[in-house]
Image: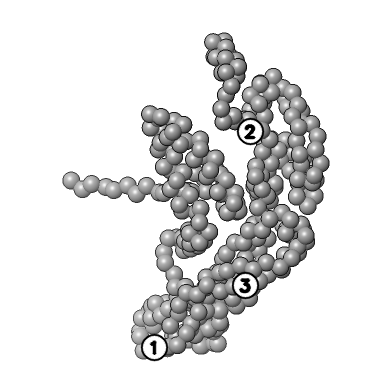
Amino acid sequence: MNESKVCMASPDPYATLGVSRDASDAEIKRAFRKLARKYHPDRNPDDNAAEAKFKEVQAAYETIGDASKRQEFDQKKRMENMFGGGGRSPFGGGMGGGFEDMIGQMFGGQQQNPFQQRRRQPQAQPKGTDVHVSVDIDLSTAEKGGEIQFQAQRLKVGANNVASKVNQNFRIRIKPGEQHGTVKRLKQQGNEHPQGTPGDLHVTIRIDAGEGKRWENGILIQEIAIPFSTMMLGGKVKIELPNGKSGLLKVAENSQPGDRRRMNNAGYNGGDLDLEFVLNELEELTNEQKAAIEALRELGL
């Protein structure tokens, strides 16, 4: 009897770490530290589920925690999405002679191809594939603008038309108020082609918003730590906004972690800001806090 094999897809490292695909490298590192601390075996003794989650988090960070490994992973996924998992020459190019041979056979081999005249028209010069990289900048650089330097790996054609990978330094200008996710194109700075022109280099700008902040679809998300008692009973908490303003935020009764409040024009560069409620985590409880929680447990809370 034939046995069928089921191929399990690898977990998405971005989803495992709870970050978006356009997260900065620093944001990924912060997310990993938070989850590793949460599921660490020392904090969860004899908990197999927590141990499995800890290993999953570690594997995800090993995949995208390093900038170069992350770039390789993203490039691989980009190619899979474009070509259905099949490979492609890094030089780019056309379909080859398969279609031409098929047409010739359809019309008797030696017989003239009825499309020959059109086929013999000048064809576009082959072009190397584009290269995609991401560069992280801090909020200060994004707000004030300036010039930054970064490194990208590309294919260069040398002697005898042999291509080799090289790491090349580039410089680009950041305009004041640069937006997260902006893509800048450097023409003909991608992979070179032995019989044609180089592809382009696409540079995605990622703004590291700092501790407790992240981006989702161009919206800045800021975490607001709220005590459990305030979540349940309601109240007010002090907040500091990215624009430097501070104030008190009203928390409704029976609020839940993950609830959000939209603040228009309060985010980066006058954009919108989402305040996301998170439970205030304490590293260590005092005896009084433990006693209070025990009392709540006895009451079924």
Q: Which residue corresponds to mark 1?
A: 111
The crowd level at tag 3 (other Cα within 10 Å; few <14, some 14-19, many 20+) is few
User: Callout 2: helix, strand or loop?
Assistant: strand
Which of pointers 1 and 3 lies earlier in the amino acid sequence?
1
In percent of width and height, residue 141 lies at 72, 59
Residue 21 — which label?
none
Q: What residue do we see at 35% from left, 84% from top? A: 108
Viewer-proximal residue among 171 and 112: 171
Viewer-proximal residue among 189 and 136: 136
Query: Which residue of the protein is positioned furthest toward the left in this rendering?
Result: 1
Q: Amino acid at mark 3?
A: Phe
Viewer-proximal residue among 71 and 242: 242
Q: Which quarter of the image is occupied by the C terminus?
A: top right
User: Callout 3: helix, strand or loop?
Assistant: strand
Q: Which residue corresponds to mark 3?
A: 170
Q: Amino acid at mark 1?
A: Gln
Q: Quadrant of residue 202?
A: bottom right
Separation of disc 1 and disc 3 at Cα?
A: 53 Å
Vertical side of 49 occupied by 142: above or below: below
Vertical side of 185 occupied by 234: above or below: above
In percent of width and height, residue 217 lies at 65, 49
Q: State if disc 2 and disc 1 touch (CB < 8 Å).
A: no
In percent of width and height, residue 283 lies at 57, 31
Q: What residue do we see at 38% from left, 32% from top? A: 48
Which numbered mark, 1 or 3, is in the foreground of this view? Answer: 3
Residue 278 — which label?
2
Separation of disc 1 and disc 2 at Cα?
A: 74 Å
Q: What residue do we see at 53% from left, 43% from top? A: 33
Q: State if disc 2 and disc 3 touch (CB < 8 Å).
A: no
